Amino acid sequence: MTATRLPSNSPGSVATVAEPAIDPLLVVRELVSLRRLVGLYPADHPLIGEKLRELDAAVRRQLDEQPELQVDIVRGDVHVDGEPFRQESRAHAHLIAELTELGVQSVCIRHGVSADELRATAEFLWRYDGKPGGESVQERLQREGVRHVSLGRIVPLDTRWASRKWPDAPDGALDPAYEEALGMAQEAFHRVSSGGDLDAGAVRDTVQLLIQRVAGSHVALGHVLAVKHYENLTWCHSVNVAMLSLLIGRQVRLDPESIVSLVEAALLHDIGKTRVPLEVVQKPGALDRSERKLIEAHATYGGEILAGTGGLRPLTATVALEHHRWMTGGGYPDLGAGVLPHPMSQIVSVADVYEALTGARSYKPPTPPERACVILARIAGEQLNAALVKAFIGTITFFPIGSFVRTSRDEVGVVVRTSSEDPLRPVIMLLRDDGEAVMEEVDLAGPGGEHRHIVESVPAPEGAPSLGDIL
Amino acid sequence: MTVVAANPEPEREPLAGWTGRLEAAEAFVLLLAKALRQVHAYPLRSQVVIDAVNACVSHLVVTDGPDEISLSVSPDTLLLHDHPLGETPFVRHELTRRFRRARVAHVRINRDATARDLTRLCVNLLRVSESADRSLSVAVLMAEDGVEAVGVEVTLRREILDVGASGSSQRDLIAYERRRREESPPANTRTVHLFPPHRGWIRLDPAESWESITLAELAILVEDPTALAGILERLVGDSAPADGDRSLERRFSDVSTLFAGLEPRLSGMMFAKLARAVLALDPARRQELLKRTVLPAIFDGRSEASVLRAFPDPELAEALCLLLKVESAAPALVASAMDQLKLEPERRASVLPLVAEIIEARVTPMLGLDRGTELALDQQARRLTRIEPGERRSFIELAGCDLRLDDTAQEVIASVCSGIRDTDGTMAEIVCMTNLVLLQPNPEVAEAFVTAATRHAAALVAAGRWTDVATTLEGFARVTGLLRERRPEVATLVESALLTFATPDFVAGLMAQHRQGSGGEAVALRVIDAMGPAVAPALLELVQSDATAGSVAVGLMCERAPLFAPALAGSLASLPRDLRHHVARVLGHAGAGYEDCLGAMLDRTDERTTREALRALSRIATGAAAVHVADAARHARGWMTTAIIEALLRFPVEAGAPAIRDLLAHRPFVLANPEAASRVIARVAQGRVSNLEPVLRDVWALRFRFWNRALVRTARNAGALVSR
């Protein structure tokens, strides 16, 4: 490569003269023009020298106040130093097309670039066929002495991610009352999400159904307490939280009237999610600021919906508003320093966290109950009321009814009864190797359980009988 | 040479109900542009702005057509279903240009949009289009303002992410990763966008043949977890963070998710890099990251915990022992954490002694345990952390959870139950409504909650539940205070709600409550504090109509004089004459700052007010107050002179003496009131007053006026003081 001789009035002198700001695209246009000239004319042609001088001057003016100039073309739109640069000009359209045809959609020129490097870049571009593969362009440019110019190709970042798809409701045979409650809750949620009003009468009926029939069913409790291999963040979750709240309420000996209020509040605590797009609710990845705000707004939306609905109990809206508030005053929404959640909200929060943990999510399988209990214990005191957590775990135990467990003898069984006195040693119903139930109960805390203990929770084996059959 | 063909005329969308009404839409766009210009040029409350915005609203109301106007923003013009609108230079300059600067792609204006909605659109559009802060978004600002009738879609800023030239090993890894995914596509999955689509663009070497880069491939290309976190931060945030470490902390979960999605061996390598990046963090920040994100993930089964497996043994032991600082549970959790990490037996065996050492050396003393407990803990740690071959896993962490419902827990549970049982429904609803008002940015929506809460509060007043009334009004006052800066419109609403209680009947009830005693005074004061000076007119009205209740009311105002004084002083001119002496009393209790106001009340024709004002001035007892009293004395006659002298004598010597000296220097006063002058001389003699002697000599000079015996006595007193 021959050294280029520049006229004496350039380039250094140009850099020191204060000139008005120039179009950053001028640099690219000059580079493309120079490319054509070096391809069409002999190396010492005066037009080349003139164009190089102009390019060098333009570059120096641009780099006078910034370390580098980067021009990117993304889908036909020009970006200068990362910012969209809009200037309608047919000349720019041509140079964009010319560069893009070469497979070059980005040019970066850094401080310290010499006229020789600019010329070498133009010559390289003339020779470059734009075909991908082979040695990298960067290495080839460096071999030709170009250290301060880089060329690039812009491709889209594919942000799609395969996340686990779970059913959106429990499958298999369900306790009829539980199934009916799910149906009623689904209807109520659909009604609100489609712009209708919440039917307070239907809510009262669902609450009575849960208290009078569902809570008395071991099978239904098994559905609620064990891991849930479905992802439903609205009505199934709400029915389950209502049931779990009911368990806590009974454990702490709430009076019947308060229990009714508690179940109603728990059933509707997430009604605000009907105003949040499902894709945001289920999004497994990072939420941007507006998405995060939207998710957090569900508590406020819930409070607004319920406060505007006649015929509900007084604390129902409060619980919807506060169920993500922490015992230390954190959480959301921000109601001011020192504002603690109402005791009823504290109960629903415990149930809500447990239900969320033991349910499936697109980004994680359901957490086994015993592990969920450990997590509850971990966040007790800060997020949750520690005494209520203790009462809750004491009620459901680490291996609640309906959980499939493996024993130290490598047997699989289903927990059919629990004892708060010995939460690690429930009564289990053993299954045969083929998954069918063996009608043999083993009390792990009793004489038959001396040589067995639970090793881990396991998913329901293939072909395992339904909880209804076992319980 | 590339020839760019002219685009054929694009096929336009149907006008969706705007057929034949384009002129109306055009007119609206023009009105909106005019409103924007006025908002830009004049204060929001100016009539020009109000008129301009109202013109837009009226136009929306009277125009026939679909329920909303939906405009897309093209480079030069606005499009209503592909039909250009606003092609005049004025609309381009005022509206289209600002939409583009604010990166607005689409705007939807409902026909029921209010003046506030359109004003907020103009304000936010101006704010964003004129700001250099790239993180501002019209859509977010509109949402924060609670505007639902105007929807704005913003074009996402494109992030061009330079990953540099890739090496051959990276190309191989990417090729391998692509093959792996093609050969065994994950089953039972749904595809979601982990990050906003169309936002990130990767700058590659032109020789690379890839047509797009997936997130997993990005992780391979970038290699450095900190740099990767910075890139992910740019994809989510609205501006590039300055600090790479901070990005790593914030996007740690995302980086872990990407690494965990790679082929297991490659994933292990990437987590090893991540571990190095975490260990390179400043110790305090590393601990915070471990405590907040990594350690909890062990038990939640999330991928962030995988980084711990790549920690060297000593650092892993240190990290695990952090659990004891975070958790309330026993050291059992440390062993459990090792179970969860599924460490190989050899690794576990080498980490365990390190953990035990740390527990013994640092954690036990940190917990402040005595010798006995220390031993027990040590034994427990040893027992719980032992390796038991043959058991797949243990539940030691469950044993570590203290589930006993001890006395404290029982007390808490009892308080929870009583808290629920004793909750008053009306109060619960009021508190909830008040909180909703606090959160609701849109005053039109907030108004419904304010109205409902006010209705409930009125029921409390009617029921005479004054303690609950006080709590409710305190809640209102709190919301007003919190929102005054952030959302003045909502704050004004709540203030207006408070004002509805400022009636004579309400304050009469309140005074009756005050007179009852047994805590009623405190409740009344709480209500007064919550309502603030706005309740003053009602109190004064009560003072006029009911002497008994009025005296209580004045007493209350005196007790909270600093609260009421500014408003009372400001409205003095308009107050009835028979209330002025009450106001004077309150001002006297308010203290310094009201001397001029009280001085102006010294009026010979209103004896009651003047006497109260004099008492108030002597209560304030500043030099300025004394000056007002002394000035009044110069022209006083009869009862007023006596009252003034009494007031002057009540001033502390230091505060009153200079004014008294000046009064004595006023010869007409001494000549007209020699006995009064004699009393003030006696008073002034008690303090050290500068330049007093010339004044006393002047008085002494009056000793020869023997026809006025009182004056002679006064002069002799002055002379005695001079000679002393």
Image (tube, coloured by chain):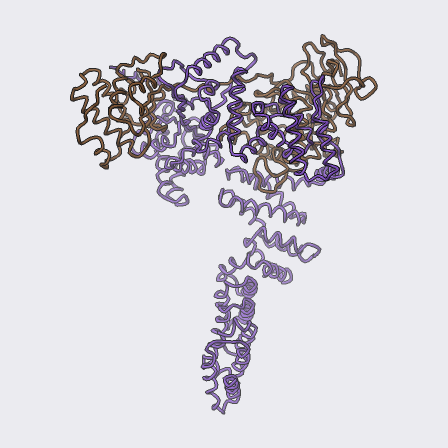
Chain colours: A brown, B purple
Query: Residue B50: horizontal and vertical position, in percent?
Result: 40, 42
Query: Residue, x 35% and y 14% (percent of image)?
Result: A135
* Residue A327 visible to the viewer: yes
For the residue pair B388 and B654, the one nearer the viewer reads as B388
Q: Quadrant of the N terminus of chain A?
A: top left
Query: Residue A189: horizontal and vertical position, in percent?
Result: 60, 25
For the residue pair A128 and B111, the one nearer the viewer reads as A128
For the residue pair B155 and B579, the one nearer the viewer reads as B155
Up-down relation of residue B613 to residue A268 (above or below): below
Up-down relation of residue A289 to residue B674 (above or below): above
Q: How many marks?
A: 0
Q: Quadrant of residue A252?
A: top right
* Residue A185 visible to the viewer: no
Query: Residue A250: horizontal and vertical position, in percent?
Result: 75, 30
Q: Quadrant of the C terminus of chain A?
A: top right
Query: Residue, x 24% and y 27% (percent of image)?
Result: A56
Toward the right, the furthest residue is A447
Toward the left, the furthest residue is A46
For the residue pair A228 and A80, the one nearer the viewer reads as A80
Query: Residue B545: horizontal and vertical position, in percent?
Result: 60, 60
Q: Quadrant of residue A4?
A: top left
